[in-house]
Image (spheres, rainbow, N blue to C red):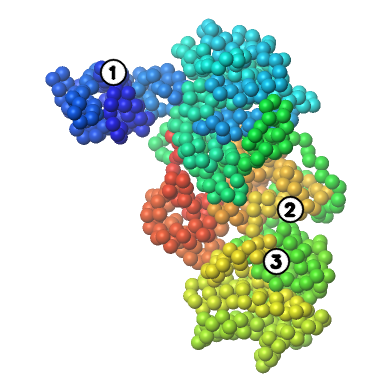
Amino acid sequence: MVGKLFTWVDVDARLADAAGEQAWPHWLSEVDAWWDGVDLSVLPGTPQNEVRDWLDGQFGLGSVVTGGDGLELVLDRPRGYASQMLPVRLVETAESEAGARAVASQRRPSLTERRVTSALAEHLIRPADAQFDGDTQVMAFHSFKGGVGRTLHAVALADLMASKGQHVLLVDADLEAPGITWMYQAEGHPCDIAYEDVLALLHSTQRGDPAEAVGIVAGYLPNQSVSHYPGSGRVTVLPATRRTRLGPPRIGPSDLLTEDRSPYFLTEALAALAVAAGADMVIVDLRAGASELAAPVLLDPRVVRIFVTTVSSQSLQGTDAMIRQLGAMAPAAAGTDPTPGAIITQYRLDVHHAQATRAQNTLSTALSSAIALIGPDTGEDEELGIDEQVLTQPLLSPCREELLALPQGWDAVTEVIRRCGLPGLLEEFEPATVLPPPPIELPSVRIDAAPLAPVITLDDRRRRLEETSRPLVFAERRGMDSGLGFLTTEPVRRLIADHSTDLPVAVVVGAKGAGKTFTFARMCTAGSWQAFAETNDQRAERSAVVVPVLDPANIAEPQAGLSSPQELRDRMTNGVGVTADTIRDHLNGALRGERSDDPEFWRSTWLECLAWAAGASKDEPAEDFLLRRSLDPSAACIFVLDGLEDWLEAVDDEPKRVALRTLLIEVPAWLRRLRSRGVGLVVFVRRDLARAAIRQNQGQFFDRYAPYELRWDTEDALRLALWLALKGSAVPHLPTPVSDLGYDQIVHSLLPLWGAKLGSDRSREASTERWVPAALADFNTQIQARDVVRFVCEAAKASIGDERWPDRVLTPSAMRRALVECSQAKVDEIDQENPRLGKLLRHMGTRSDTVRMPFEAEDLDLTTDDVEALTQWGALARDPDGLFRMPEIYRHALGFRTKGRARVIRS
């Protein structure tokens, strides 16, 4: 509601806002506000009292009075001034909905609407053609505030595309404070024609045909090329002006918005100019702020709109508001128009990390609101899903001191930009029309896996991939199989590398499904620390036998000829060793004992368990046994423990907390005091259990063991997917081990598996390299190895028989269905892995029929403790609007649909 009504301008603005909010009554079609009154176009027979009540609702009770000639709005004046009224005139009109549509079709792409009608609730009419002339890509850089690095990033993208062989037309459209123009002219480059000239020539065209103006401009552009690369790669600059005198433009973009021209006359003319000049794409550097100098370009949904901001509150809030306003007027049609993007600049990694993360979330939500679906308005919300999340993630461009004081000329500036790595940072904005880069040359080292039997058809490859992947979904049940290949991950590699000459005393933290039990089983299969290192293509100077102490419940019996954990304990006694059940009984008795909350008691209890597993008798003091063993080089051993969650289930009372905290902190500290370090220890524990047990100095504990944490990030997930594809003969074999490949090499090698995008390579769909990890990750950015394997398996199965994608093994539709399967399986398994989380998820799922995401905690009856726990587990996150969301890997199984973030675009 308007705070003060001083003039007709305030009335006009408020009623325009109400139209955009769809708050106009059915009887009102148009508002014309003037200095001497307000004309309301209403349906015949509209009661005056109904008009008065509605106006009171918009401006506040008592804002409208009935005068001698009808209704009047009371204007605000200070005390002591005579009251002043603004007459309200009712003009009866029979304008139909079709007439309102006609009004909507006449709207121009401008931030300031000339007519206030009910059509303001609608989007601007879409362009007649879905693509620009010649399928030319037009990209526009905009910022709410100046000085945020907008021009630098526009130049960096132009330089990047030129380096890839593209001819880029770079337009300086900042007619009030040009930056590219000064850089270009500082080195004496010729300036035969400028953007001002383009506007003037277009303004003089007849019948909305830009052909003659385009031809004239194209004839003068060849002399204005810079940044030449081999082949056709270059940048052609169209400066803002040829004039040296400062001043406003004589012809502005808004002057072109006449009724005889297309609403998108300017952007279509720029695309036509690129075609005439032989350019592959257009990059436009716009005027900052809410300026009509930028509006005609920003309001064309076919333009790639890239918003640049810092983490500064003013810049960020203004950018957020601008994106949302543009989304309300001209949203990008999902799957047709390019997705808008954002870049967050000028922040320090060591100071502003939290602010940058919040800024990413804020802008991602705003960018999502600028996307809509094409189709009939069914009245129901639609969802864009994980694709939207992937496509709208803003880029981060941290502060670089070299960019704070730039040189004057074009060549010097681009040299600094290249040295700071800005072009490479912007590769994500590489247009879909650009051909993929040439194949990556991989050094010839060795074959990662033995060649398998030839596969004849695409469906054969899919079946082979499914058959290879399915047994690996629960890898811990196959970990005792020495014939099974495995992918050495960086945490395991680091654990071995850090303990080549001594034995590790370490805690390996990881979520369920991250590979804890699989690694435990592999250590047992190897039988010794030295053999375990060799199976990972590494070397350990120190040899020690592996002694399992506590076994996980879900480990399978080994194949013939291989040792189980129990057989390894039996060897320690040359007979029958202690069993895992005996050790669990001893631990359970300690939980029930009188000293169950005493750390000293628990240290002794754990040392007894270690000693018994290594063959000590129950009468022998555990500390003496372990000390004696550590001094005997031939008796070196490394204890391994897994399955703590099977024993504890949950750390929900003080005895359990003390027991686990002692194992994770006090026992390792005691073992490190042994001088010869002839006894090692590796404890595998779930992260949430460790957090529950260690309430003080958590950060110090997790930091100490961070290099060994079984945490799967984006690169790890893609590496695992490639390893599976190689094992299943889904992609060509590589001459380099998967573990030695860099990120770009992994992405390139995965193209035969799932293509570059969830669609054709030139489509507007999300890139697979980002979609897959984002779809499988929780809100702690953690991905379970099990989910990756299951996803590949289910996608391979669902792809069989689909002949529409001969260039890839996994089809887009199959990958989307696989995500749903993975979500359902994950939630089903959580009941056994994390009962409290499982109970909360089941409770939330009971409301999915009536509640849509994002939601309030109260919508699902979630307590503060529930929200804290779900957030800690990565199953819930608060968005910038204060509402809560779930990751895709949980949402699908629980049946939550998302609220439409933008209205549907009528086709």
Q: Which one is in front in this view, the residue at disc 2 or the one at disc 3? A: 3
Residue 35 is tagged as 1
Q: In terms of depth relative to the viewer, which is nearer, 488 or 248?
A: 248
Q: Which residue is mark 3?
A: 519
Residue type at the position of mark 1: Trp
Circle 3 SS class = helix
The picture places residue 21, in percent across and down from the top left corner, at 36, 33
Mark count: 3
> In the rendered structure, are the residues bearing label 1 and label 3 in contact, judged by CB atoms less than 8 Å apart?
no
Percent from the top left, x then y, of residue 832?
Answer: 54, 67
C-alpha gap between disc 1 and disc 2: 73 Å
Q: Residues within 10 Å of mark 2 (few under 14, many from 20)?
A: many
Residue type at the position of mark 2: Trp
Q: Position of residue 659 (x, y in %)?
A: 56, 77
Name above or below for residue 40 compared with residue 721: above
Quarter of the image where one finds residue 149 = top right
Q: Residue at x 60, y 65 (%)?
A: 700
Q: For mark 2, what is the residue? A: 723
